[in-house]
């Protein structure tokens, strides 16, 4: 019995939709915080550092989370910048320095004081912009005392904003991997956090026409996934990304999916 493409994707989802599978993923840090306001602070830090080798990502996030005590929101609102600088002195994650993390946290502190939460900031951006990620990124960059492009890229330069969209995914979707918590957005409106594995997947299948992994490429891939799951286009993101990391020969996986995709036209025809 042959599988359809949707059945194959659902099979992958069933396999990877497991909290244990997330243990070696930045999202796992969010599961330790039941309070949504604490979770969103941990989430923005974890997502911003989600690049490079997984083992190093986990170590770097652990170092930042460790200084924020049991209640990251209260901690962030009460501690001075000098304290954060002292605690993160010598911190380095690839080209990200401790001062970059401090600037991001300071920007979050300013925006939380202004809007009440990062979720409320998102809601404000959603009401004003067609793509809330753009306004959210601009707000963080403007509130930061220093340039934080290494953590929050300029959306005006057609960046896919992969890490910011990863953060939104964690905070909006809810299953065994993504903890969710935000109620001002629905999974249907999320955009794929376009990493190298998802870029390769979409490009090989012809679902991405763009020549580079930019913001428009992320939209193209999201639109393709909406055909399979319009209410939750990012449903298969974790499974496919981790399959790409784990597969000894990802090309074999893509080849198999290509065969299945011939029965499903991503321009909307079966």
Image (cartoon, helix red, strand yellow):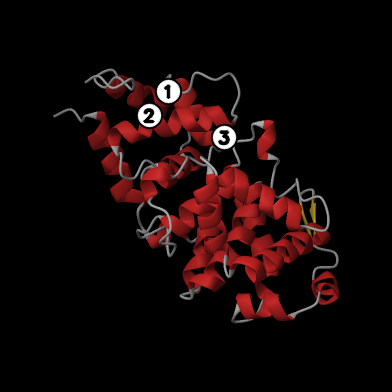
Q: Name the residue under label 2.
A: 224
Residue ID at (71%, 50%): 151
Per the model, the C-alpha gap separating discs 3 and 1 is 15 Å
- Any mark on residue 19, and which? none
The front one of 160 and 258 is 160
Residue 258 occupies quadrant? top left
- Any mark on residue 196, and which? 3
Residue ID at (85%, 64%): 90
Q: Mark 1 points at which residue?
A: 207
> Which x, y percent locates residue 73?
61, 75
Mark with earlier residue (3, 1): 3
Q: Can residue 117 be seen from the camera position used here?
A: yes
User: For mark 3, does the 10 Å Cα neighbourhood hold few (<14), some (14 to 19), or many (20 or more) residues?
Assistant: few
Whether residue 188 sits left or right of residue 242 in the image: it is left
- Circles 2 and 1: CB distance less than 8 Å? yes
Residue ID at (40%, 55%): 173
Residue ID at (36%, 45%): 188
User: For mark 1, does the 10 Å Cα neighbourhood hold few (<14), some (14 to 19), or many (20 or more) residues?
Assistant: many
Q: Is mark 1 on a helix, strand or loop?
A: loop
């Amino acid at each position: 019995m042959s599988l359809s493409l949707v059945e194959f994707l659902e099979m992958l989802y069933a396999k990877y939709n497991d909290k244990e599978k997330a243990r070696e993923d930045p999202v796992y840090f969010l599961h330790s915080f039941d309070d949504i306001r604490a979770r969103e602070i941990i989430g923005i830090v974890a997502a911003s550092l989600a690049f490079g080798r997984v083992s190093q990502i986990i170590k770097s996030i652990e170092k930042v989370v460790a200084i924020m005590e049991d209640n990251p929101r209260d901690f962030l609102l009460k501690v001075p910048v000098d304290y954060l600088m002292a605690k993160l002195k010598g911190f380095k994650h690839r080209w990200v320095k401790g001062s970059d993390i401090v600037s991001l946290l300071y920007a979050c502190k300013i925006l939380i004081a202004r809007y009440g939460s990062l979720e409320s900031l998102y809601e404000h951006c959603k009401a004003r912009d067609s793509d809330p990620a753009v306004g959210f990124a601009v707000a963080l960059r403007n509130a930061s005392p220093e340039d934080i492009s290494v953590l929050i890229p300029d959306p005006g330069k057609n960046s896919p904003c992969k890490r910011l969209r990863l953060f939104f995914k964690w905070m909006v979707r809810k299953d065994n991997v993504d903890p969710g918590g935000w109620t001002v957005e629905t999974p249907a409106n999320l955009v794929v956090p376009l990493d190298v594995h998802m870029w390769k997947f979409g490009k090989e299948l012809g679902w991405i026409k763009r020549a580079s992994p930019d913001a428009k490429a992320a939209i193209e891939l999201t639109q393709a996934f909406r055909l399979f799951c319009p209410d939750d286009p990012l449903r298969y993101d974790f499974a496919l990304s981790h399959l790409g990391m784990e597969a000894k020969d990802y090309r074999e996986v893509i080849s198999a999916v290509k065969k299945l995709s011939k029965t499903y036209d991503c321009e909307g025809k079966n």
